Image (spheres, grey):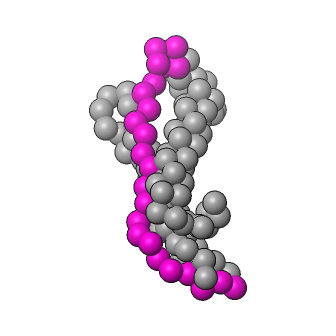
Amino acid sequence: MLLLNIDYVPGREIEALGMVKGTVVQSKNIGRDFMAGMKTLVGGEIVGYTEMLIEARQIATKRMVDEAEALGADAVVNVRFGSAAVMQGAAEVIAYGTAVKLK
C-alpha cells in the first residue's frame, strides 16, 4: 500500500474511494510513569514514551491501511496523524487519509 502525505500520486490519475482512518488508545504503565517522572528531574528524551507513541502510530497506520484495502484501494493520500489525551494517563493516536484507486 502506497502511503503519501500529499494529495496526489505523482504521474498517476486517481479515483477517490473515501476517507479511511485507524485509531488506537494507548496507556502508560506504572514503570514508564515512574521513569518519566525521574527523567523530568534531569531533562532529556523520555524514551519509554517515545517508544509507546511509535508503537501507537504503527498500530493506527496498520488499521488505516486495513480499512483502505477493504475498499480496494491502491494508495492512501493526504495521510495525517493526530493525537489527543482521552483521560489521565492515556492518549489516542489517529492516522487518516483518503483511500484512492490508481488509474
Q: Is residue 18 magenta?
A: yes
Q: Is residue 34 magenta?
A: no
> 45 or 61, which is in the foreground?
61
Magenta-highlighted residues: 11-33
Please tell me whether the stretch drawn in magenta is mainly helix, strand or loop: strand
Q: Is 4 left, or right, of 82 in this rendering?
A: right
Identify the image quadrant of the C terminus.
Answer: bottom right
* Residue 84 versus residue 96 in the image, above or below: above
Horizontal and vertical percent for residue 76?
A: 55, 66
For image coordinates 58% across by 43% down, the residue present is: 58
Q: Is 39 left, or right, of 17 in this rendering?
A: right
Horizontal and vertical percent for residue 29?
A: 47, 19
Q: Quadrant of residue 102?
A: bottom right
Horizontal and vertical percent for residue 62?
A: 55, 47
For image coordinates 59% across by 39% down, the residue present is: 54
Horizontal and vertical percent for residue 44?
A: 63, 32
Q: Kindly tell me whether residue 81 is visible in this rendering.
A: no
